[in-house]
Image: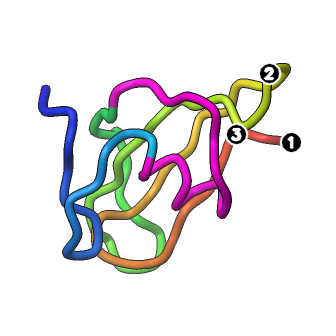
Amino acid sequence: MSENRVVQGRMVTAKKLAELVEGESVMEAESIAEADRDCPDCDGDVLTVGYMPSVTEFVTGWKCQDCDWSETDRD
């Protein structure tokens, strides 16, 4: 699987994708993967990435490749 993916017309790394989901810098990110879901806003393809926004937290985030929609697994 490629480490870089196109999101909203820009090539992004896993860390940059995590930052798009989080809205700020993250410490570390895992590889980008295809999510088994479609975007609820535009029916576009959704990517998923696991990342650490801080030393004590691990978050899974989802981001649409075509629009601004994103969400995380935080409660």
Query: Magenta segment: does it hold 27?
Result: yes
State the SS at label 3. Answer: loop
**Disc sitting over residue 75 in the figure:** 1
User: In this orientation, which residue lies closer to the viewer: 49 or 46?
Assistant: 49
Mark 2 or 1, nearer chain start? 2
State the SS at label 1. Answer: loop
Circle 3/circle 1 CB separation < 8 Å = no
Residue 53: % across, % down: 71, 37
Q: Is residue 3 above or below residue 11?
A: above
Residue 44: % across, % down: 28, 68
Residue 15: % across, % down: 45, 41
Residue type, label 1: Asp
Image quadrant containing the C terminus: top right
Residue type, label 2: Val
The answer for how far apart the CA atoms under marks 3 and 1 are is 6 Å
State the SS at label 2. Answer: loop
Residue type, label 3: Asp
- The residue at 40%/65% (across/down) is 39
User: In this orientation, which residue lies closer to the viewer: 31 or 26?
Assistant: 26
Determine crowd level at label 1: few under 14, some 14-19, many 20+ residues with C-alpha closer than 10 A. few
Q: Is residue 61 above or below residue 30?
A: below
- The residue at 35%/58% (across/down) is 38
Which residue position holds label 3?
73
Magenta-tinted stretch: 16-31
